Structures are given as structure tokens and as C-alpha cells.
Amino acid sequence: MRRVHRLVLLAVAAATLAACTTLAASSATAPAPVGGATSSTSPSSAPTTAPADLPVRFSAPRPLAHGVALKAVSCASPTSCLALDAEGRAYRFDGTTWSGPAPPGPQQIGQGAISVSCPSTTDCVAITTGTDQVVSFNGQVWSAPVTLVGAHGLEAVGCATSGYCAAVDAEGNSFEEQNGRWIRTAGDWGSVSAISCLSATWCMSTSGGISHWDGQRWSVPNPYGASSSFTGISCPTTAFCVAVDQRGDALTWNGQAWSAPTRIEPGQSSPTSIGPSPTAVACPSPSRCVAVDDHGGVLEWSGGSWSRTVVDPGQPLTALSCPTTSFCVAVDQRGDVLVATP
């Protein structure tokens, strides 16, 4: 009997050990729960705990275009950025150093405010405001300028990571790039200041109002105020966007509708009341947004209220790109560049 009892005890111990081993292995291999806001969370309802990988400080301004205003920047990743100046010259960042300037192609596409979008490290599209031409960059060389038939002064371009790009001119004529060929599409409702695209069937554009592209047509823009003039928009998902305007307001999209404007800085509320005003916004995720303004300020939102820090005193910051929650690049009117890393 004692031998049988000993065998039973040994069997129970073995089973217990096996169960514990299985539980430990399961705990080690199970994915950790994902925290933070969901794609439909808006800044007003997001958790107040900020992710650990947020950019915490921008570098001091570094001369890049040496007195020529930098007007646009787009980063496909923290090791691949492209900045363009007001004379149509390009500057590249490889994660460590900036190179350039270099003409964007066999001939420059003209002077003026430039819009650029880089959906990948081997694909960038740029325009010069007021022209009807686009140029593309494959990571090595720039293409010759391509004239968009029917365009009347292109205003902005936006590209999705799939490679789809949309451009709109000063009259609201819109165009899209498909397989390397630009075609005219159903028109937008006027000039635009910025375009954010997630796919061939989903884009948002801003100017006096905000319009949505569904692959067939642009929606009638809602002005969200009597005198609102939007300066930037960023949509990391179809259920979350942030738009900023010259009045110093920010609006959020929750997948169904836009919020009421929230004042994040003084802005240009009247001809006699002019304060810092947002010029661009970048949201690398639904829990992280960064904006820059025309008084050298950076506004950060990470699940709570907006906070502002002056990083470039006396200089208008003209453009911003944040490909991840821990990396951003801003450029200014003096031709300087500022980089934010953890």
C-alpha cells in the first residue's frame, strides 16, 4: 500500500510541475496588452498618461538653407527626410546628417512655397505653389517636372503609404497619381493648404474648411467658424485627425464628425489681436500630436491638454513632419532645421 501511495504522490507532483511549466511558458509568450488610446479616441477623452517614447525636446535651430526659407519637410522614417526651400532646392537627412542642397531635377520647378509628401524612403512627390508641375524622387534621383493638364496653380500634395497621391490647385481642381500617371479627378471645393491621405479612397483637405475624399468625390467643406482659415491637418487613421487654423484653434475627427474648435493658443482672432498661430500639425498616432506656430513655438498633445514651448525664438516655423511618436523634424523661415528625438 505504501508503494502505491508513493506512486500516486509522485504522479500528482509530476502533473503539478507540468501545469506550472505550461503556465510559465504561456505567460512568457503571450503578447502584452496594448495600452493607450484607440483609433477613435479624441484628445478630449484620451488617457492622460503619455507613452514613454514621445519626443521630449527639439534640438537648437541648425542652419541648413542659410538664409533661404525652408517651406516643406516630409519624413518617411527617422532615417529618411526631405526638406525643400523656397528656391526649389532639396536637402536630405539619413538619420545622422543632412546633405544638399540639390536641384529637384534637371531644371528647378520654380520659386515659391513648396508642398512635399514622402510615403516611403523611395517615393516623394513635390510641387511648387502656383505652378502646374509635380516632380518625384525615387530615393536616388529626381524626375523631370510633369505638367498636370487642367491645373491652375497647384496648392498642396498628400500621399498615402500605399503610394497613392492627391494634389489640388487654387481653383479646387484635383488630381491623383495612379501607377506613375497623373489623372484629373472630381474637383475639390477651392484652394487647399494641406492634404492628408491614408488610401486611394480616403483623404482630408483643408483651407477655409475641411473636405473628405472617398475615392469618387470631395465632400462640401464645413468652415467651422465664420472666418476660420486652416493651416494644417494630419490623419494617422480614418478614425482620428487633427486640424489647426490661424485663429489658434484645433479640431479633432472621431471617425464620424469633427469636434467644435478648441483654442490652443491666441492666434489671429482679429486684425488688432494677433498672437502665435499654428502653421502645421503632425499626428504620428491617435495618442500623439505635435503642432508648430509662427512664433517659434511647438505645441504638444499626448493624451491631455496642449502645452507650448518656444524652441526657435523670433522665427516662424513653417513645416513639420513626425513619422513616429519619438521623432519629428521642423523647419523655419530663416532656413534652419530642428530635430526632436527621445
Image (spheres, rainbow, N blue to C red):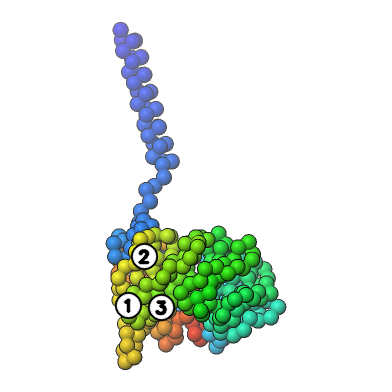
The residue that mark 3 highlights is 208
Image position of 12 with respect to 83: above or below: above
Residue closest to the eye, 288 or 8: 288
Q: Is residue 138 left or right of residue 247?
A: right
Q: Quadrant of residue 245?
A: bottom left
Amino acid type, residue under disc 3 in the picture: Gly
- In the rendered image, is residue 65 in sight? no
Q: Secondary structure at mark 2?
A: strand
Q: Secondary structure at mark 1?
A: loop
Q: Secondary structure at mark 3?
A: loop
The residue that mark 1 highlights is 225
**Residue at image x 41%, y 42%?**
30
Q: Which mark is residue 250?
A: none
User: What is the quadrant of the N terminus in the image?
Assistant: top left
**Residue at image x 67%, y 72%?**
143
**x, y percent for residue 255:** 37, 60
Q: CA distance from mark 2 to mark 3?
A: 17 Å
Residue closest to the eye, 40 or 208: 208
Q: Is residue 112 left or right of residue 51?
A: right
**x, y percent for residue 105:** 67, 76
Q: Residues within 10 Å of mark 1 (few under 14, many from 20)?
A: few
- In the rendered image, is residue 227 in sight? yes
Task: Decide which of tag 1 and tag 3 comes sooner along the chain.
Answer: 3
The residue that mark 2 highlights is 253
Task: Decide which of tag 2 and tag 3 comes sooner along the chain.
Answer: 3
Of badges 2 and 3, the one in the foreground is 3
User: What is the quadrant of the C terminus in the image?
Assistant: bottom left
**x, y percent for residue 230:** 40, 77
